[in-house]
Image (spheres, grey):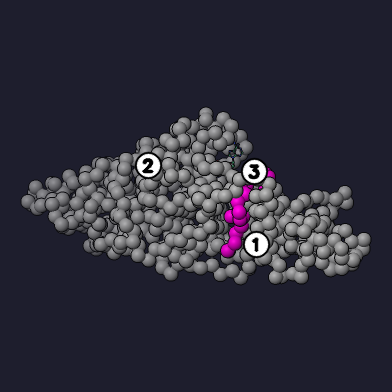
Amino acid sequence: MPLEGPARIVSELTTRGYNAEREAVTLIAAAERPQPTLERVVDALPEGTLVVRSEHVRSVLEESASASGESSPDSSDSPPASSDSPASTSDSVGHDRSSAPNDPTDVPPNDPPVSTGDPSQPSSSSNADSPVETGGSADRFDRGGDASRRALEIANDMTGESTGTGEYKDFVAVFRDRLERLGSKLRGRFNHRPASAIQSMPGGSEAAMVGLVNDIRSTASGHWLIELEDATGTFPWLVMKDREYADLVEELLCDEVLAMEGTLADDSGIAFVDSMSFPDVPRTYEPSTADRHVQAALISDVHVGSQEFMADAWNRFADWLHTEEAQHVEYLLLAGDMVEGVGVYPDQDEELDIVDIYDQYEAFNEHLKRVPGDLDIVMIPGNHDAVRLAEPQPGFDERLRNIMSAHDPQIVSNPSTVTLEGVSVLMYHGVSLDEVIAELPAEKANYDEPHKAMYHLLKKRHVAPQFGGHTRLAPEKEDYLIIEDVPDIFHTGHVHKLGFGKYHNVLAINSGCWQAQTDFQKSVNIDPDAGYAPIVDLDTLDVTVQKFS
Ligand code: D5M
Ligand code: FE
Ligand code: ZN
């Protein structure tokens, strides 16, 4: 069967157990008779070769050119061999990564070829099997063909909007905003009363209240007392231990907003809970999907600068993005912890590979350069990044933006919502997940199933409900941490575990990381999922996981 183009050549080589450099494939595709050329190249490979390199092809082509007087492909109209540095053309292609040595070195890559340019300009070639674009582009497969159909919008980015001074009145304002906005998702469902009105209702009355959880206590007899607060005051609600709702008490976090319905005790002053409701995601929620086959890679926690940063796995990921298999990946989302940072945890400096924070970002940028230039990239900061720790975290400052300029990423706050061709993705780094996992019983939230912890945030419609624990809060004029609109995808990281699942049809994905186990993680038995990239089909919300470690 004739070899129709690079894609067929790659598949032909992989079925014979070889991976191939991009340039080698280009050269074979450009030969006058690709099939016999491929046969001759394979025959001439030194024993033990795993990757077909451009040198292998060139020597075969030169041989046959001198035998037949043919011109070399370099002088034909076909795609020229790249004149860039070797690193720019060393991208292995193929599907069998297990046999792919890829880049055996651990050094940051040299500059790969520049981007194909403006992604809104479709590239000249729209057929993945047609010869590659000219100009030594890294993007052999034609992502750009549909670039005109790309659409990316950002919402809820609070970068540059920070007004809070951290004073008491700011905290009052942000909690008021939370109660108002999350409460409005509940108020329509109940005949609710303010705390002050309930305080003066006669015993035996039915009552409902929407409030913030102010306190959770167990009583001497094993029941639960939950104090709800609203703008008028507080009221205590008693959940009897044998009621069906008792099970929900262990899910509660302080400062979340919910509704309680129940009956006032005879001497009033307290109410017995009959039902408890959360702002939640409707069970019937129907997520939006893209109207073409297009994918997004959702990753986080790169931790460049740490001795445990897995450069090899990253390089394999970046190289894979250049292959045909990844041709539909047009978006790359990074949910924080781009670098390891400095002084984040005690004794962290002992595990630093790069000690200067700006040097860490420079190195991160070098790694970012290796991914295809025509990806649309969005990133938010995490707790290791050089922005304020308190949430919401504004996007990186000018100096860091200038450093992290490879492929012109969109840099937004943590959290932010990015909508890709109609599919909304709530991006949040995920520090509150530690808290959810610590507070809830293990079957409801644990490190091995981080997506389950995410479900609780969706149910509470807030990315970091509890104030005063791990998660630091910077009060702003509004509560940016509220999940105002139901997202189609919820993307977090931070806990360094890969997990995904659906909650009321919303896809929750916690990316793994690109950092091998640190000494601290070893000491507390955190076994990270390092070197994986979850890839989401935006037209179906299906997930496939690519492993690079
Ligand atoms: O944290 C990755 C995960 O490991 C996250 O679940 C917190 C936890 N972690 C890591 N180092 C520490 C220390 N020193 N104290 C407490 N918890 C820790 P990340 O912040 O993304 O590196
Ligand atoms: Fe991290
Ligand atoms: Zn983190």
Label 2: how many residues lie within 10 Å, few (<14), some (14-19) or many (20+)? Answer: many
Q: Mark 1 points at which residue?
A: 181
What residue sits 53% from the left and 41% below the top? 384
Q: What residue type is labelled 3?
A: His
Is residue 418 visible to the viewer in this orientation of the structure? Answer: yes
Viewer-side label of 1, 3: 1
Q: Is residue 12 visible?
A: no
Q: Main secondary structure of the magenta part?
A: loop
Above-or-below relation of 293 to 349: below
Mark 2 sits on what residue?
Answer: 366
Q: In this view, does 184 lie to the left or right of 425?
A: right
Q: Identify the residue under disc 3.
A: 470
**What secondary structure is marked by label 1?**
helix
SS of the residue at dot 2?
Answer: helix
Residue most toward the left?
69
Residue 22 or residue 112, whichever sits in front: 112
The stretch of residues the image draws in magenta is 466-485
**Kind of residue at badge 2:** Glu
Q: Residues within 10 Å of mark 1 (few under 14, many from 20)?
A: some
Spatial CA span between label 2 and label 1: 42 Å
Q: How crowded is mark 3: few (under 14 residues within 10 Å), some or many (20 or more)?
A: few
In reply to whether residue 475 is colored magenta, the answer given is: yes
